[in-house]
Amino acid sequence: MKTSTKISSTLILSLTLLTACSKDDDGGDSATANGELTASVDGKIYESMPEATTAEENSSTGFEVITISGGSVDSENIQISIIGFESEGTYDLNGVNIATYTFLGDKTDFMSAQIFSTSNGSASNGEIKIAEYRKGERVKGTFSFTGYLTSDTSQKVVVSNGTFNVSIRD
């Protein structure tokens, strides 16, 4: 279980960094997207910054994957990845379709990241409903999940009333 948690943590952090980085560091496309992502995190209002909110599609692994991510001004991030994405519908969030809530314990130290993930071995720790989807253009829907701290699964965070309406970055 500890190895699985370390692998999941590494995957989540890698996905978060990939989503946050630009495509071309020589002045090409940036991570700037057009969208919004809001939720309640343990009862506290969470709102992403439009310029830190994005969705990406990828099928290079043989599976269609869509990742929706929104970062806040408080160094927080909510990210959801659906592996085997097909279209509009409801998807369970678990160890395959992963949702995370991440924040920096010390905003000056990226190694202080606290990652709460749905990847704890349960069949479902929440769900995402894709209400509207236009391939390569836009994705819209709702979500809720319980995330468990990857370094101590006795600690959890409840993310509820989540909504998103995001342009898909090409």
Image (cartoon, grey):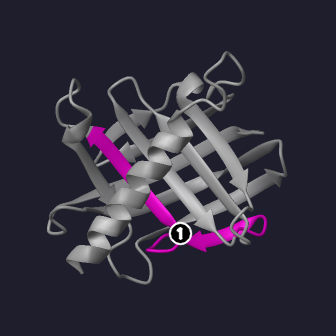
In the image, 125: left or right of 140?
left
Question: Residue drawn at (45%, 59%), measured in percent from left and top?
Answer: 99
Kindly identify the amino acid type of the residue bearing the numbered disc 1. Asn
Provide residue 93's location: percent of width, then percent of height. Answer: 49, 69
- Please state the horizontal and vertical placement of residue 17, each as a whole percent of the image: 46, 41
Instruction: Mark yes or no: residue 38 visible.
Output: no
Q: Position of residue 161 (x, y in %)?
A: 47, 51
Q: Residues within 10 Å of mark 1 (few under 14, many from 20)?
A: many
Please say whether residue 90 is one of the residues in the magenta stretch: yes
Residue nearest the observer in this picture, 34 or 24: 24
Q: Residue at x 21, y 30 (%)?
A: 109
From which residue to which does the magenta span run? 85-103
Question: Residue beneath label 1, please?
Answer: 97
Residue 144 visible, this angle:
yes
**Closer-to-camera residue (126/121):** 121
Task: Name the image quarter holding the C terminus.
Answer: top right
Compared across the picture, whether 15 is left or right of 55 comes to left
Which quadrant holds residue 145? bottom left
Q: Is residue 106 left or right of residue 110?
A: left
Q: Secondary structure at mark 1?
A: loop
Q: Residue at x 67, y 57 (%)?
A: 66
Image height of 168 relative to 2, above or below = above
Q: Quadrant of residue 131?
A: bottom right
**Does 112 appear in magenta?**
no
